Image: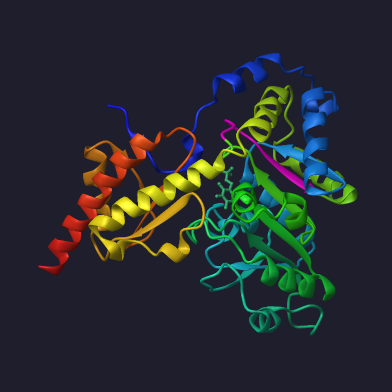
């Protein structure tokens, strides 16, 4: 049985044009800095972000680990959202492998207020406190439901943090989606941060790959740390070619994924309005609020009917749109999800 797979936008497969680009890639040993496809791609991403240098890595977890490490490796701490991917979905790697501590803020917007940031922040203020050396943000905010961080607020917060001596890191796994929705360029967003991580294996549809962009000296140090972590790869230019193809041919089409997410939401809302908060639906991630104790049941029931979604919390389900879906499939998934959620709610309320 073929599923309509809404679990994540990581499930996409290489498109025919992408496979041709991979087959045509000119490659070499990247540990010797001899892979032309990687060198060109890194240069292009550095230019796109307005940074001095960039490094291609297997995953966004690795680019985040390295970006955070370079600013907090000498005993500094990181501040981030309590639902941040770096805090929740990287398996504790920052602590386990790099000995880095984090403190988190709780927010609806993915950002603290300025006064909250000031209260959390600690830089050389006392001999008894660890110093905040990095403040990290995530845009779009995955577990926040694909939320786009407000640019003006983000500017205020990052300026304040940098003025007070901390570096800023952006987990821009889906910064592409924020750009498509707001028209604010990748370079404009990146200017607020010292290091920026971009994923090519999510909405952009490459099979593998993330890039970390930042200052030359930081990327140089990171190059060694990537090698220590086992991330020195060889003829990975075939993957860089896929990622570059994704950037050139599959970025602008993300608007379609956003439309499909809205279509999905509208159909589900026609069965049960309470499942969706339309204010939070800003890109390709839809969080469905299904109520206590029925999330598992809904996930299992729709799976039987051919729709795969992810259970995110005790009461929530996540559905993500991507290039592997047609509008017809999205409509069909909307009907199946809408019916299952309405049924579950009726059971709970009876
Ligand atoms: C997917 C994702 C990453 C990186 O995940 P990998 O699977 O390690 O590539 C980082 N941040 C966010 C917000 C993500 O959604």
Q: Is residue 163 visible?
A: yes
* Rendered-image quadrant of the C terminus: bottom left
Residue 46 found in image quarter: top right
Tell me if 247 is positioned left or right of 106 in this view. right
Is 228 covered by the magenta stretch?
Answer: no
With respect to residue 114, does 43 lie above or below?
Answer: above
Q: Report if residue 211 lies within the magenta region.
A: yes
Height in image: 2 above or below 77?
above
Q: Which residue is at 72% across, 50% downward?
A: 186
Q: How is the image coloured?
A: rainbow
x then y, percent, for residue 48: 78, 44
Task: Report x, y in % for residue 178.
Answer: 61, 53
- Determine the residue positioned at 84% across, 23% down: 34
Identify the magenta region.
205-213
Q: 187 or 237, which is in the foreground?
A: 187
346 vs 338, left or right, is left
Residue 39 image-quadrant placement: top right
On the picture, is 226 further left or further right than 7? Answer: right
| Count of marks placed on residues | 0
The one nearer the camera, 138 or 323, is 323
**What is the x, y in percent for residue 340?**
21, 51
**Foreground residue, 189 or 39?**
189
Residue 203 position, x and y percent, is 55, 41
Residue 320 visible in the snapshot:
no
Residue at image coords 57%, 38%: 253
In the displayed image of the protein, which residue is found farthest to the right? Answer: 217
Tell me the quarter of the image containing the N terminus: top left
Residue at left offset 21%, top offset 45%: 301
């Amino acid at each position: 049985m073929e599923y309509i797979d809404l679990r994540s936008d990581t499930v996409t497969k290489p498109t025919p044009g992408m496979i041709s680009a991979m087959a045509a890639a000119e490659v070499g040993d990247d540990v010797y800095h001899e892979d032309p496809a990687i060198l060109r791609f890194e240069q292009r991403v550095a230019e796109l972000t307005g940074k001095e240098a960039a490094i291609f890595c297997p995953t966004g977890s690795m680019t985040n680990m390295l970006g955070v490490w370079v600013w907090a490796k000498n005993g500094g701490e990181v501040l981030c959202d309590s639902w941040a991917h770096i805090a929740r979905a990287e398996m504790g790697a920052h602590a386990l492998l790099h000995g880095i501590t984090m403190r988190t803020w709780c927010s609806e917007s993915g950002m603290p207020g300025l006064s909250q940031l000031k209260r959390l922040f600690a830089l050389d203020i006392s001999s008894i406190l660890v110093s905040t050396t990095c403040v990290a943000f995530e845009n779009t905010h995955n577990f926040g439901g694909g939320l786009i961080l407000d640019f003006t607020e983000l500017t205020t917060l990052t300026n304040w943090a940098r003025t007070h001596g901390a570096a800023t890191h952006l987990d821009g796994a889906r910064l592409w989606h924020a750009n498509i929705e707001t028209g604010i360029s990748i370079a404009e967003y990146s200017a607020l941060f010292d290091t920026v991580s971009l994923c090519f294996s999510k909405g952009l549809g490459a099979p593998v790959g993330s890039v970390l962009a930042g200052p030359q000296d930081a990327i140089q140090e990171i190059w060694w740390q990537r090698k220590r972590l086992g991330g020195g790869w060889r003829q990975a230019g075939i993957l860089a070619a896929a990622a570059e193809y994704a950037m050139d041919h599959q970025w602008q089409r993300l608007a379609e994924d956003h439309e499909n997410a809205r279509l999905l939401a509208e159909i589900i809302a026609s069965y049960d309005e309470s499942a969706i908060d339309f204010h939070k639906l800003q890109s390709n991630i839809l969080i469905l609020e299904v109520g206590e104790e029925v999330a598992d049941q809904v996930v299992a029931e729709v799976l039987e009917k051919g729709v795969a979604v992810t259970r995110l919390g005790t009461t929530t389900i996540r559905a993500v749109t991507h290039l592997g879906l047609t509008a017809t499939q999205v409509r069909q998934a909307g009907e199946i999800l809408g019916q299952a959620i309405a049924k579950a709610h009726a059971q709970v309320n009876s």
